[in-house]
Amino acid sequence: MGSDKVITHLQMTSPGQLRWARVVEGLVLVPIDDPAGVSLPQLREVHDRIGSAHRWSSLTWSHRNWVEWLSDPALRHWWIEVDDQLAGWGCLRWHSGPEVELDTFGLIPECIGHGYGGYALALLTQRAWDVPGPQNGAGLGGQTRRVWLRTSSWDHPHALANYLARGFALVEGRDEERRRGASPG
């Protein structure tokens, strides 16, 4: 893995752009209704198992960073399960507009390579289009008009291809960002 990190921005502007992957029987998204109430050690362990191979910058977060992030009312979290076994985690962030960011998405290492990623991504993207945004002081509720994400060259080698296969498109006018250095983020 090189030290150059290339960040690519992708988006969907209509739910009709979503292209479904092969259905994986038994794969479901399980809402984490109270992420602050979830065992933080469990969530961090899953996060670290997913993110360590991809140098996620959040691997270095303090306990306080985690508590603040999990208490953000604009976030919604889901466990990805296959046949009642944990396979990964996804998180959506609602923004004004209303827009939804695919904030976090990944599978634990032993679940990679089984065809779960495409279907899990399609399910999570469908949630971004279908689930009304959380209502809070920022007025983030409303029908989604755009779903977007950032991926990097440090993510799984098939991540970008999976996003494109699901119907995400490169954001025109956004140059790929390059970050240099050995530190994550």
Image (cartoon, rainbow, N blue to C red):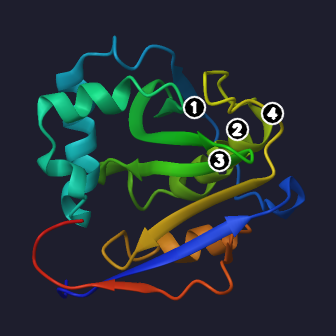
Vertical comparison of 140 with 102: above or below: above
For disc 1, the marked residue is 29
**Element on which disc 2 rests:** helix
Mark 4 to mark 1: distance in Å? Answer: 22 Å
Q: Position of residue 146 (x, y in %)?
A: 75, 56
Mark closest to the chain's N terminus, 2 or 4: 2
- How crowded pointer 3 is (Cα within 10 Å; few <14, some 14-19, many 20+) is rated as many
Q: Position of residue 130 (x, y in %)?
A: 79, 36
Mark closest to the chain's N terminus, 2 or 3: 3
Q: Quadrant of the C terminus?
A: bottom left
Image quadrant where residue 43 sits? top left
For disc 3, the marked residue is 100
For disc 4, the marked residue is 142
Image quadrant where residue 143 sits? top right
| CB contact under 8 Å: marks 2 and 1 | yes
Vertical comparison of 177 with 137: above or below: below
Mark 2 to mark 4: distance in Å? Answer: 13 Å
Marking on residue 127: 2
- Residue 82 seen: no
Q: Nearer the viewer, residue 81 or 55?
A: 55
Q: Nearer the viewer, residue 55 or 68?
A: 68
**Mark 4: amino acid:** Gly
**Element on which disc 1 rests:** strand
| Residue sitting at x 74%, y 31% | 131
Mark closest to the chain's N terminus, 4 or 1: 1
- Residue 155 seen: yes
Mark 2 to mark 1: distance in Å? Answer: 10 Å
Q: Nearer the viewer, residue 94 or 5?
A: 94
**Mark 3: amino acid:** Val
**Element on which disc 4 rests:** loop
| Residue sitting at x 34%, y 11% | 37
